[in-house]
Amino acid sequence: MKIRFYISLMVVALLGGLLINADATRVLVHLSEPVTAAELAQLGTQGRVIRDLHPLPWLVLELPNTRRVLRTTAQEATKNWAYQPDVRGYFATTLSTPTAPNDPRYAEQWHLTEIGIPKMWEMTQGEGAIIALLDSGVDPDHPDLSANILFDQGYDFGDEDDKPYDENGHGTAMAGLMVAACHNHKGGCGVAPAAKIIPYKINQQGEEGFFESDLAAAILAAADSPAKILSLSLALTKSSQIVQDALIYAKAQDKIVVAAAGYKGSGVAYPAYLPWVIGVGAFDKEGQRLPSSNYGDGLSLSAPGVDLLTTLPGTGYADWYDGTSAAAALVSGVLALMTALEASATAPELIVTLLASCQEVDTPGFDSQYGFGHLKVPLSPIYSNTEPSLKFTPQKAHVFRAGDTLQLSLSLGGVSGRYADLYLRLNLPNDTIGARKNLFKVWKSNDSHEKISYNYTLVSPYFLAHDMILPLFGTPTALLGAGIIDSHLLEGAYELLALLTFADNNSTVQTRKIVWITTTAKE
């Protein structure tokens, strides 16, 4: 039997700083093939096997509590042992001085109106939806949370018990943003006040950070739970293979993973930048990106992230929660509302609906500052259909696989007799994970569609003799190609942005279409 060992010193991270846990030297063991009971016992001679992350090929061993022993063990290992540094994790939030309220605070919850929640509540408040909260635990006895916490279904992976109580406060705050009860004369309201939460605690008692193996174990448990949404208001300082394996498993179970972009003010943190994870940034009351909010191509969207009222352990509240951690919780709550309305929808279908409903900010389409835009509940199209109009033809399918045909057309109305430019941009995942790229096209109405390639500029403006419908994909005369989904395309969101700019007054109408291309095989 050939076994590949990944040896690493487990560390935990402090909110705002890092802390090494000297009593918890752990070894991540990756098995290249199944092991027998005897072989597992042999592994146990190197340390105590504390977790089997089945169905993933990973074990977690605990070694004596000195770095010297870890080095000695590594020196005695065979040449088949490989090493990788461990990954430090932190809860992504910005802390301020808390203020404990003593009366109903709904009027202070500016974020609910900002993202359109009151209108969404006319259809659902999240009945039947379940969110898995992977955090510091939760206070199940808070009067604004007790009805919505499935405490007995949760687990404390940090301390290895079935009581995921929150000593830190972070998890309780995230829970309040998502599912705090409404119409009960207490505090404020969560985004989805009728949804439920299964809490998975990932940090140890007295610690404000977590081991990556505990996070991976929690992801696996959440993936096998009734929860549709996995809410991770946290980030790692670098990528982690064991966490990524667990996330891939969750994706295969048709789960939606939401993660905070991080609060370092730079590139999007892991795992938020993964293409199948919804990475969430934060904006302020003026709609501007928080300076501390991470940004980049790995960002999916942005949500309110300042002065958010939420619950604290005990019976209290705070109106000071900031950051991408809180923003991610709001997105998870919106997804719970969507799940309640469309219980049969797949994860990619819900993600596409969420992204397509975002409100673009400074520039049309995707950008690295806000992702696909500001979070808005999916009630109606962002753009009106006033004349002149530009819109994509209605389409039932939003998720495509290799070999599928994408049939899509663009309708131009109210344009007869005018000069205009039609601009198309396709924004799609790049070869590097967490990166995206743009392909551009300017269309000339009397030219052969097939001969116009991306990144090719033509003289403009063009005379539009009449209103028209332009086939974009899936027909022999398609503007952009045959529409057969190539097997080499990467998984993720693909955005087609269309802008029509008129020469006479420089006015612009625009629209966009977002689809999801998945590598998951059809059942």
Image (spheres, helix red, strand yellow):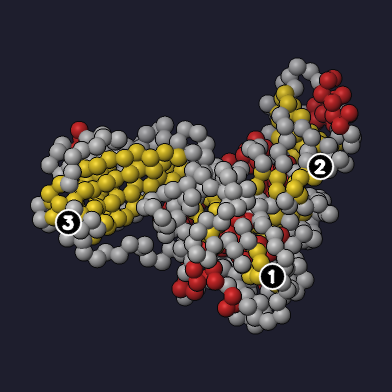
Give the amino acid type for the residue marked by disc 1 in the picture. Answer: Ala
Judged from the image, the secondary structure of the residue bearing numbered disc 2 is loop
Task: List the residue tagged with mark 2.
Answer: 20
Of 221 and 116, nearer the camera is 116
Q: Viewer-nearest of labels 1 and 3?
A: 3
Locate residue 177: give its quadrant.
bottom right
Task: List the residue tagged with mark 3.
Answer: 504
Residue at image x 59%, y 48%? 265
Res 436 visible: yes
Judged from the image, the secondary structure of the residue bearing numbered disc 3 is loop
Q: Is residue 288 above or below residue 65?
A: below
Q: Position of residue 365 (x, y in %)?
A: 38, 51
Q: Viewer-nearest of labels 2 and 3?
A: 3
Q: In the displayed structure, does residue 408 sit left or right of residue 157?
A: left
Of 20 and 213, nearer the camera is 20
Task: List the residue tagged with mark 1.
Answer: 318
Q: In the displayed structure, does residue 423 sit left or right of residue 121?
A: left
Sequence-wise, the earlier of marks 2 and 1 is 2
Q: Is residue 238 above or below residue 386?
A: above
Sequence-wise, the earlier of marks 2 and 3 is 2
Locate residue 472: give its quadrant.
top left
Residue at image x 49%, y 43%? 297
Q: Quadrant of the N terminus?
A: top right
